[in-house]
């Protein structure tokens, strides 16, 4: 798995880390049943506070992507899904956005706004 | 991609390798078979060919077939190893690898060819059958054969042309498009493929069954059996621990830890010159699988054939690990090394 965070980004570090894990799950580089390193190890590698990593793990757990158990560590629980349709829709969305000259930040805000209006349940702590 | 280019061998060099890797061990096998054949008139109809841990006989073979039973495995191993070494692809292993493998082939055939007749000769009937001194010639031949094998390895290493590292190994050094301040880590586990796991599992199960059976048959405590069991268990655990690894590349450098905790390699970032993507042929480049030493100061964690990550140290040593995707860790390491080399003021 390849995980990355950028302190220069406006997005908080824990969200970036969680997004990095999510991206890995989606592109298949992080498999179902794979164990994430301990929060302390990952914090050392990425020069982060342990609490930042734990917060990211907690967020992933609340999304049902991670199983956190004492003694077993953090294990990915994301059975592989067929994402062909989602990927195609994303490609179309990105194409349409660039045709309409909408920048990435604006696009993401649009997607967020749409998600929060369609979802009645809370998806996780902000 | 070839890491080393060994110039084409001359006919004389090929003959030298063939002599030690194939011809000598094969001749030893034939000699052992021929020797046993000359004993056929004073051997019992059934000859003991296997003993249990406590020294009790538990395997017999017909005396008429004994030359074949002894000769065929020796010839087979000599043929297999000899061809493996003589194949053109083996030239990539570098001269040290070829020399060591040739010496091993010679040694293995010769020792089997002395050990097996030595276990048979005491079973001959007739005069002198209880005379342990008949074993002395076998001992002498075995010692001489060890010396011969070592000599062969040395001769081959001298005769073969030196390995030439190609600049090609420097070209395949990917980098990553990482923002200046971004931090990244690559973590993976590496282990042997399913087929190898099944083969190892079967071998392991067989050994455990054998050990358990031997222990149950010798119900009283047998110190020899206990020592052999302990040695086998230690060897098995250390072999097994070399087949599953936890790998990490980050700002601290590169590290590979066996899942059982040992062995472990850690290379600090400031000791790394660069990382490359290379192709590995386990037998030709490293003489097999597991924790391996190859030519050109390469240390290998060899779990499969195909693509591998090569981490090059400042002192010229290289660590090679076979991986499905060596691109990502190689790119990350190169990017981090490059970043470390840049003067601090140049980092914006």
Image (cartoon, coloured by chain):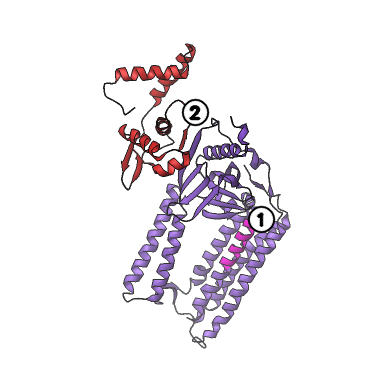
Chain colours: A red, B purple
- Residue under numbered circle 1: B95
Does the magenta stretch mainly form a helix, a strand or a loop?
helix
Disc 2: which chain? Answer: A
Looking at the rendered structure, the secondary structure element under dot 1 is helix
Give coordinates of residue A22: x percent, y percent.
40, 32
Residue A122, compared with residue B45, is above or below; it is above
Task: Judge whether residue A36 can be spotted in this image.
Answer: no
Toward the viewer: B220 or A54? A54
Residue B230: which disc?
Answer: none
Toward the viewer: A98 or B100? A98
Q: How many labels does the image show?
A: 2
Q: Does the magenta stretch include residue B102?
A: yes
Quadrant of residue B60 within the rendered picture: bottom left
User: Residue farthest to the front?
Assistant: B345
Q: Is residue A25 magenta?
A: no
Disc 1: which chain? Answer: B
Same subunit, tags 2 and 1: no
Give coordinates of residue B122: x percent, y percent.
49, 81
Task: Name the front one of labels 2 and 1.
Answer: 2
Give coordinates of residue B150: x percent, y percent.
64, 67
Give coordinates of residue B320: x percent, y percent.
56, 48
Quadrant of residue B203 within the rendered picture: bottom left
Mark 1 and mark 2 in contact (Cβ < 8 Å)?
no
Residue at 63%, 48% in the rendered image: B314
Residues in magenta, as a range: B95-109
Disc 2 from disc 1: Cα separation:
51 Å
Left or right of residue B195, residue A124 in this image: left
Task: Judge whether residue B94 can be spotted in this image.
Answer: yes
- Residue under numbered circle 2: A8
Residue at 49%, 72% in the rendered image: B66
Q: In which quarter of the image is the N terminus of chain B?
A: top right
């Amino acid at each position: 798995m390849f995980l990355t965070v950028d302190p220069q980004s406006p997005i908080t570090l824990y969200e970036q880390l969680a997004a990095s894990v999510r991206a890995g799950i989606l592109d298949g580089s992080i498999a179902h049943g794979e164990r994430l390193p301990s929060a302390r190890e990952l914090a050392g590698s990425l020069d982060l506070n342990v609490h930042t990593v734990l917060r990211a793990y907690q967020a992933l757990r609340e999304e049902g992507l991670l199983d956190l158990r004492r003694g077993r560590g953090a294990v990915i629980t994301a059975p592989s899904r067929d994402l062909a349709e989602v990927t195609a829709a994303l490609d179309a969305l990105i194409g349409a956005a660039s045709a309409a000259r909408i920048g990435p930040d604006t696009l993401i805000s649009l997607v967020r706004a749409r998600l929060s209006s369609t979802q009645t349940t809370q998806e996780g702590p902000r | 991609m070839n890491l080393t280019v060994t110039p084409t061998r001359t006919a004389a060099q090929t003959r030298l390798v063939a002599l030690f890797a194939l011809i000598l061990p094969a001749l030893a096998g034939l000699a052992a078979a021929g020797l046993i054949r000359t004993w056929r008139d004073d051997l019992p109809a059934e000859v003991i060919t296997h003993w249990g841990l406590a020294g009790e006989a538990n395997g017999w073979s017909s005396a008429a077939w004994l030359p074949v039973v002894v000769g065929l495995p020796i010839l087979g191993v000599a043929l297999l190893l000899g061809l493996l070494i003589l194949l053109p692809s083996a030239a990539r292993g570098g001269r040290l690898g070829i020399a060591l493998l040739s010496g091993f082939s010679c040694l293995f055939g010769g020792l089997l060819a002395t050990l097996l007749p030595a276990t048979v000769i005491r079973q001959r009937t007739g005069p002198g059958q209880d005379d342990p001194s008949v074993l002395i010639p076998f001992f002498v031949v075995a010692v001489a054969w060890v010396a011969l094998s070592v000599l062969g390895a040395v001769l081959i290493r001298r005769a073969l042309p030196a390995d030439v590292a190609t600049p090609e190994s420097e070209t395949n050094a990917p980098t990553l498009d990482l923002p200046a301040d971004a931090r990244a880590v690559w973590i993976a586990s590496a282990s042997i493929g399913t087929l190898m796991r099944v083969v190892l599992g079967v071998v392991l199960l067989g050994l455990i069954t054998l050990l358990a059976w031997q222990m149950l048959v010798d119900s009283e405590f047998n110190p020899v059996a206990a020592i052999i069991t302990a040695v086998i268990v230690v060897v098995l655990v250390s072999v097994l621990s070399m087949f599953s690894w936890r790998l990490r590349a980050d700002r601290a450098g590169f590290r590979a830890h066996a899942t059982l905790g040992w062995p472990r390699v850690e290379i600090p970032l400031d000791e790394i010159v660069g990382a490359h993507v290379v192709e590995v042929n386990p037998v030709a480049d490293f003489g097999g699988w597991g924790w391996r030493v190859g030519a050109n100061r390469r240390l290998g964690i060899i779990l499969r054939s195909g693509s591998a990550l090569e981490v090059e140290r400042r002192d010229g040593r290289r660590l090679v690990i076979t991986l499905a995707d060596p691109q990502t860790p190689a790119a990350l390491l190169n990017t981090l090394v490059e970043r470390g080399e840049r003067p601090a003021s140049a980092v914006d």
